[in-house]
């Protein structure tokens, strides 16, 4: 099974950015951990991070067109609250996806409380810290194994 992890803007700063909210683990450490967890379950996890909206959209499109991706785990960062284009891409490829947020977006500033993608996500993990990624990964693997 092939899975795709997409991290959006500013997540490249994990480990150095607002440690009281995002912790001290770097993006590379997070990706390595998730890749190993996926591998232990017989799955391949491709990871991308970009600050560019169009690259997220291209990755979503390629997940269907080129990469045979079974599920997507996405933390769109600030694009969560602004990008109808990412929503349309996710809806258009019809690949199940899981929305992840390290902090609880519902307990932060008002502008962070709305997500353009939550209502079409298979499941949303918010406020679990980096553990939310593991929860999403496990859910994606288990759901896809059940459907196989």
Image: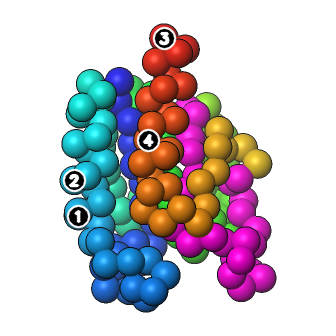
Residue 2 vs residue 131, the one in the foreground: 131
Q: Which residue is mark 4?
A: 137
The numbered dot on residue 28 is: 1
**Which mark, by number, is residue 32?**
2
Secondary element at image label 1: helix
Q: Residues within 10 Å of mark 1 (few under 14, many from 20)?
A: few
Viewer-proximal residue among 140 and 121: 140
Residue occupying image coordinates x 68% and y 54%: 117
Residue 35, quarter of the rendered image: top left
Question: Sequence-wise, which precedes: disc 4 or disc 3?
Answer: 4
What residue is shown at x 24% (from left), y 31% (from top)?
40
**CB contact under 8 Å: marks 1 and 3:** no
Q: Secondary structure at mark 2?
A: helix
Q: What residue is drawn where x is 71% and y is 77%?
A: 107
Callout 4 crowding tier (Cα within 10 Å): few <14, some 14–19, many ≥20:
many
Relative depth, front residue between 74 and 146: 146
Residue topped by disc 3: 148
Residue 60 shows in this picture: no
Task: Count the numbered circles shown.
Answer: 4
Above or below, comparing residue 10 to residue 39 in the picture: below
Q: Are marks 1 and 2 in contact (CB under 8 Å)?
A: yes
**Which region shows up in magenta?**
95-118
- Contact between marks 2 and 4 (CB within 8 A): the answer is no
- Looking at the image, the residue that sits furthest to the top is 148
């Amino acid at each position: 099974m092939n899975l795709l992890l997409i991290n959006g803007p500013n997540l490249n700063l994990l480990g150095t950015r607002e440690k009281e909210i995002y912790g001290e683990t770097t993006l590379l450490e997070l990706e390595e951990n998730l890749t190993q967890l996926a591998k232990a379950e017989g799955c391949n996890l491709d990871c991308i991070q970009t600050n560019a909206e169009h690259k997220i959209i291209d990755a979503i499109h390629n997940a269907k067109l080129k990469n045979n991706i079974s599920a997507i785990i996405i933390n769109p960062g600030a694009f969560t609250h602004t990008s109808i284009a990412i929503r349309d891409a996710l809806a258009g490829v019809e690949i199940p996806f899981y929305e992840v947020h390290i902090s609880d977006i519902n307990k932060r500033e008002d502008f962070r409380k709305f997500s353009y993608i939550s209502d079409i996500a298979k499941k949303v993990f918010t406020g679990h810290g980096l553990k939310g990624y593991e929860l999403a990964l496990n859910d994606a693997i288990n759901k896809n194994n059940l459907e196989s």
